[in-house]
Amino acid sequence: MKKILFIPFDLLAHYLRCLEIAKNISASDLEIVFLNSERYFDFVSSNGFKKTKNQCVAYERVIENAGKFDFSWINEKSVKKAVDFFINILEDEKPDMVISDTYPGINIACSYLKIKHISIVNAYATNNYALLRDVPHNHRANRFRKYLTQEKWDRIVRIVEEITLKRVHTPFKKIRKNLSIDLKENLFDEFTSELNLIVDDPEIFPLKNHDNSHVQSGPVLYTCKKDDNDLLNFLNKNSSKPSIFVSTGSSGKNIIPNIIKPEELQDYNLIVTGCNEEYENKNVFYKNFVNFDLIAEKIDLVICHGGNGTMYQSLNAGKKIIAVPSIFEQEWNVQRFSGLNLCKVFYPDDNPLKLKKLIFESFKENTASTYKDKYKKVSAKYGDVIIEYLSK
């Protein structure tokens, strides 16, 4: 029996899409194991998969620093700690193949131990992305934008990005030299491998080059079978009001109540996820995790952090979206989705009155989704690719 070890970065979206792909790997003679995460072990167990004995060693303060466009969390000490941990896990588990999701350092461990490696990654986190990754809206460089043509601005952004990616990659390069394995050029090289599953819609996030090392069948949406009678009862008894789903994932800032107070939206039902406590209070239902598929037909508007999974999930359900990004990766998402008029954008440092205005405007607009039910069979396609690669 062959073994596949999944190693997602320790954020909910990465675990959920890995779980969905694992559920769609059709092979009876296969053992699937997930890197044990204290935060997400319930999701792994409920889907019937095994966990590693050792829990993941995550880079510290990633989200906090990412919000400041600060890469200090990537340093020689943190990278060595991660690589040593991955090597120990792989030597202990002895997998035939590793499938990682945006976890820098695992590529080094797989190369060192000569283990097959597949990467799950977003298009914008690769060197093969065809479009511009613009600077965050609050970056100090934006003060000079008005003095430059768009062409000059884009060129400068690309040059500075190249320099930054190489500089941040320095500790990885040093470890590669010490381990006498193949050298890489920049940080994005650490997110990819010999085979990459690009979990984005190619119409939204295109690649520059198409070759056998990149498979882009579309986004992966987590499907959940969990019932939630309390939430359904809340929506049913308040069916006269339109409903707003508010999701901040595991990496966003609290939109409610930090930006806008529930009492300011008394004319709407609010379902707020990412809460430590689960309870109902007047027009608000607070939940830690929501089975979106269960309530999608009852939702009129999604307000989210701009994360990849939530954005595609909302598009697939044909919902209007307001994105509230708080870190640069979410901004890359939102720059593209909003550029295609697929969402409205509110930044956390804007006046909260603007968010209220966007909400009211969204309910007045009549829009037809061209993405509804588009991504249903994507996970199975990636499952077939994995089985084919494992058999080589």
Image (cartoon, helix red, strand yellow):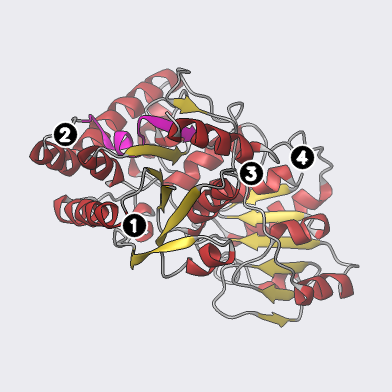
Instruction: Give 44 or 128, whichever is nearer the viewer.
Output: 44
Distance from disc 3 to disc 4, alpha carbons, whole Å, reads 10 Å
Distance from disc 1 to disc 4, alpha carbons, whole Å, reads 33 Å
What's the amino acid at mark 3? Tyr
Distance from disc 3 to disc 2, alpha carbons, whole Å, reads 37 Å
Q: Within 10 angstroms of label 4, few (less than 14), some, or many (20 or more) residues?
A: some
Tags 2 and 4 touching, CB below 8 Å? no
The residue that mark 2 highlights is 181
Q: Within 10 angstroms of label 3, few (less than 14), some, or many (20 or more) residues?
A: many
Instruction: Give 294 or 366, whichever is nearer the viewer.
Output: 294
Q: Residue 35 vs residue 382: left or right?
A: left
Vertical position of residue 46 compared to residue 357: above or below: below
Q: Residue 334 vs residue 118: left or right?
A: right
Farthest residue toward the right? 240
User: Tag 2, which secondary structure?
Assistant: loop
Q: Within 10 angstroms of label 1, few (less than 14), some, or many (20 or more) residues?
A: some
Q: Give whichever of discs 3 and 2 has the lower sequence position.
A: 2
Q: Give whichever of discs 1 and 4 has the lower sequence position.
A: 1
Tags 1 and 4 touching, CB below 8 Å? no
Vertical position of residue 336 compared to residue 304: above or below: above
Distance from disc 2 to disc 4, alpha carbons, whole Å, reads 45 Å
Q: Is residue 200 visible?
A: no
What's the amino acid at mark 4? Lys
User: Tag 4, which secondary structure?
Assistant: loop
Q: Which mark is residue 312?
A: 3
Q: Within 10 angstroms of label 2, few (less than 14), some, or many (20 or more) residues?
A: some
The residue that mark 1 highlights is 62
The residue that mark 4 highlights is 372
